[in-house]
Amino acid sequence: MKSKLIYSILRIILGTLLLGIGILMGYLARISAEPAQASFALLDEAQILLEDNYLGELPDDLVLQRGMIAGMIDKVEDPFTTFVEPASNELQTDDLSGQFGGIGARLMRDEDGLVFIIPFPGGPAAQANVSENDALVAVDGVRLSASMETDEIVALIRGPIGSSVLLTFQSSEPGSDDIDIEIVRIKTEIPSVSSYLMPGEDRVGIIVLARFSEKSAEEVKRDFLSLLDQGAKGIILDLRGNSGGLLDSAIAISRFFLPGGTILTEKEKGGVERQYKARSPGLGADVPLSVLVNGGTASAAEIVAAALQENNRAQLVGENTFGKGSVQSILALSDGSSLHVTIARWTTPDGFSIDGVGIAPDFEVAPMDGPSDAVLLAGLKIVVDLILVELAGGTT
């Protein structure tokens, strides 16, 4: 009898404890949720008032949400922390990857906003007999409108390599039905590098680097070796108008041309510092080199320019660079848009911040109007002089 009483008391105590724990957990959950709910109360209130009172037709909820995100990001007051709409994000992703699935054509719009497809010779669009006289009216059943951005239409046409896209055209012949043409997308490269031997001075090769994509380091190496095979003894690296790209690509290209040394120091949130170095000579470390820069040389391009300049590897020629000393992470959102968020700031090998200041060239040369490229000619003189020094056995 006594044991049964003790057992009953224990059950009551245990039940009471479990009930108390449940109540406490529910209370804590409610408390933790309240700030998140309260933080959006004003936004919900504004949306309700807008829906109840606006005279016209409102955009759909997804468009409104994107507008809210854009407004939130704008209040961060960092020009490089941005919200990127899905279509623009897709095209930027293509640029950084260096390839996309396309139909081998160029898109053109007339004054009325009508869209026309101009096929490249031999490409899928040309093989499918796409006529540049027929206006494109739909892509995979999505009707086009004059208000659609060009990026939106291009993003609709592009897609995974090997997949199909259905293009609907309005025939240029009056009274004719719309024309449906299905085209299989092919791998389309977006080269970030072009190169050539300097006309009249074939001892010097020019490498023009337009952006820093996933393939840029590989492309620089390929063109560098090709120029050497053609007889080049020195290189001009043209970074004019290069607005940046991937940090890893900039580090890899810096290492390619450096004999060693620090490339940059990155300072992350919380004061964490990370230093990137070239620990051994790169394949292009011994070749005479000059670098061309201007006000459009920014971000990753400035990382390379500063690394080569401050490690005494190459002299910069041209104009002061843009001055962007921060690093952004691209964070994907579920609807295909993305946030570009500043996650770190970087300093040059000598510890300087270039934010809003840029990098001063060793030789300031203004571009000339007309056929002569004064900046290129100044960079050429530097490289030719270095070649002559090497031929003379290193004496000056």
Image (cartoon, grey):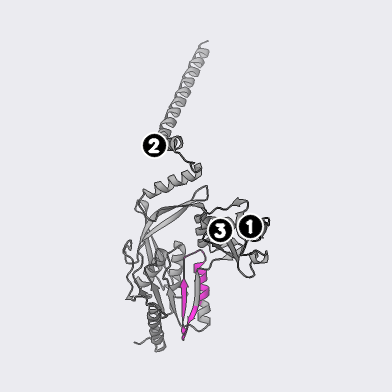
Circle number at residue 42:
2
Residue 366 painted magenta: no
Relative to 359, is 221 on the left or the right? right
Q: Which residue is mark 1?
A: 170
Q: Find the magenta span and give its range.
A: 196-224
* Crowd class of label 2 (few under 14; some 14 to 19; many from 20; radius 10 Å): few
Q: Residue 297 in the image: x percent, y percent? A: 39, 67
Q: Can residue 281 be spotted in the picture?
A: no
Name which residue type carries label 3.
Leu
The crowd level at tag 3 (other Cα within 10 Å; few <14, some 14-19, many 20+) is some
Would you say the residues marked 3 and 1 are in contact, meaning their CB atoms lie under 8 Å apart? no
Judge by depth and name the residue closer to the eye, 43 or 174: 174
Q: Residue furthest bottom?
A: 392
Q: Secondary structure at mark 3?
A: loop
**Which residue, as the protein is rendered here, is positioned at the far top?**
1
**Amino acid type of the residue tagged 1 in the rendering:** Gln
Q: Quadrant of the C terminus?
A: bottom left
* Vertical comparison of 261 with 386: above or below: above
- Position of residue 1 measured from the top left corner of the image (x, y, whole percent): 53, 10
**Local secondary structure at mark 1:** strand
Look at label 2 and name its amino acid.
Leu
Q: Which of these two is toward me, 122 or 36? A: 122
Front tag of 3 and 2: 3
Say whether residue 183 is left or right of residue 239: right
Counting the numbered discs, the total is 3
Distance CA(mark 2)–CA(mark 1): 47 Å
Mark 1, Cα crowd under 10 Å, few <14 / some 14-19 / many 20+, is some
